[in-house]
Image: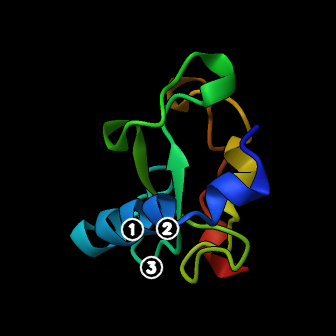
Amino acid sequence: MAKRSDLTSRPNRRTRRQILAESDTCILCGHNGADAVDHIIPVARGGTEDPDNKAPIHGTKGCRTCGRKCNSEKGDRPLPEVKLVTSRDWYTK
């Protein structure tokens, strides 16, 4: 896991800002309004810090459309291993 000082460093903040400026569509749920950036393949699982391995995702505020905290649901799993469990009426909550 990255150290807090690494996450708040100027280069990391710049990369985060650039990625969110390009798109705010969450890689997990597909809804707009992503407010965080996460690794597609976690560093703990062999991923890199390269910007190509980072994508927008909903952070601690959660998704305004589906209510998920996508980054928490993804955890340290690579994107292909994450399964969203939904029901037909999950929007009705």
Quadrant of residue 52 within the rendered picture: top left
Which mark sits nearer the N-terminus, 2 or 3? 2
Is any part of residue 66 visible from this angle? yes
Q: Which dot marks residue 2?
A: none
In the displayed structure, does residue 6 sit left or right of residue 51? right
Q: Are marks 1 and 2 in contact (CB under 8 Å)?
A: yes
Query: Does 85 appear above or below 58?
Result: above
Q: Which residue is mark 3?
A: 33
Rendering coords of residue 36 (x, y %): 55, 67
Side of 48 relative to 9 (left or right): left
The residue to which callout 2 is attached is: 10
Q: What is the CA distance from the residue labelled 1 to the residue labelled 2?
A: 6 Å
Q: Give the mark nearer the N terminus: 1 vs 3.
A: 1
Residue at horizontal 77 percent and vertical 57 percent from the top: 4
Using residue 13 as the reference point, say whether residue 20 is left or right of it. Answer: left
Label 3 element class: loop
Name the residue type under label 3.
Gly
Amino acid tagged 2: Arg
- What SS does tag 2 mark? helix
